[in-house]
Amino acid sequence: MRGVVRFGLNEMDKKHLDTLEFPQILARLAQHTTFSAGRDLALKLEPTHFPVEVRERLQETAEARHLLDAHGGLPLGGIHDVRSLAQNATRGAVLQPTDLLDIQGTLRAGGRVRRLLARLQREAPLLADIAARIETCVPLMNELGRCISEQGEVVDHASPKLSRIRRALRTAHERLQEKLNRIIASPKYAPHLQEVLVTQRSGRYVVPVKADSRGRVPGIVHDTSASGATFFIEPLPIVDLGNRWRELQLEEEKEVERILAELSAHVADLADELAW
């Protein structure tokens, strides 16, 4: 549904529209819209005094009715109201992956509608003309698809740096796990463990050590059990490995934030097109 030029209804016009329950009609129309932007447009509709525009609107309605009957309507799956996201981006906000997925889905849906109506131009020439003005923002859509997975995560190949960091992160984690497994299986440490397992406290890997064996497992105490019978200790042999793993996590977070900021800036550059 396209925007409508307002002509400034006078008080008499508004009184007649209220008598005709025109606001209630718009409310019922809005219930059939697909998303909030369409709902806003529906609620803002006003009658026109110009015969030419009346005929044009009636023709658009007839074309839309035909599309519903002959083709089941328009492929609007995946479309979202991204106006606020685009506006936030212009203010310097860093959009989250799920926000960027909404924008990508909306661009894809817009492209589908544009292509469909281009094929059906003979059947719906006025709607095809409106659809031809849809901005598909292909470079942005492709970049979002390259960097964000369908699960809403920034993918490894979003940047060469992120790819390198994540490879190093996986290697560091594997080394850390291997060292921990050797520790809990070691005859030197196993008798002093409350349980033969590895857990985490404050993002650090720890083992549960019996309180009376605390001195037998040198390391950093990160927590204790409610009863005080167990100390959760990060063994000294893994501290450096744990530090490296944490450093790489912070590097990953920083690079992901940089990528999201870069994508958000791209969205900001196209805010007018996205909010059309």
Image (cartoon, rainbow, N blue to C red):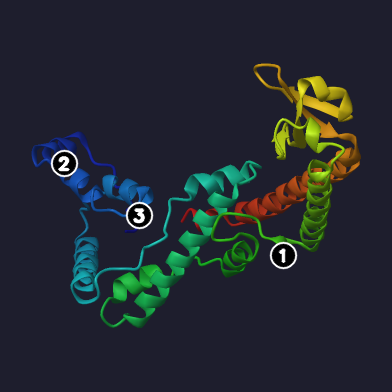
Return the disc, 3 or 1, that comes first in the chain's sequence: 3
The amino acid type, in three-letter code, at marker 3 is Gly
From the viewer's perspective, tell me whether residue 86 is left or right of residue 263.
Answer: left
Residue at the left extreme?
Answer: 19
The quarter of the picture where residue 68 lies is: bottom left
- Element on which disc 1 rests: helix
Label 3 close to label 2 by CB (< 8 Å): no
- Seen from the viewer's position, the closer of residues 96 and 261 is 96
Label 3 close to label 1 by CB (< 8 Å): no
The quarter of the picture where residue 78 lies is: bottom left
Q: Residue at x 28, y 53 (%)?
A: 33
Q: Residue 157 bears which disc, if any?
A: 1
From the viewer's perspective, tell me whether residue 74 is left or right of residue 223.
Answer: left
Return the disc, 3 or 2, that comes first in the chain's sequence: 3
Question: What residue is disc 3 on?
Answer: 3
Residue 3: x %, y % from top left: 35, 54
- Seen from the viewer's position, the closer of residues 173 and 145 is 173
- Seen from the viewer's position, the closer of residues 73 and 14 is 73
Q: Residue at x 35, y 68 (%)?
A: 75
Residue 246: x %, y % from top left: 81, 42
User: Mark 2 to mark 1: distance in Å?
Assistant: 51 Å
- Element on which disc 2 rests: helix
User: Mark 3 to mark 1: distance in Å?
Assistant: 40 Å
Between marks 3 and 2 in the image, the one whose residue lies nearer the viewer = 2
The amino acid type, in three-letter code, at marker 2 is Gln
Question: What residue is disc 2 on?
Answer: 24
The amino acid type, in three-letter code, at marker 1 is His
Q: Residue at x 29, y 45 (%)?
A: 44
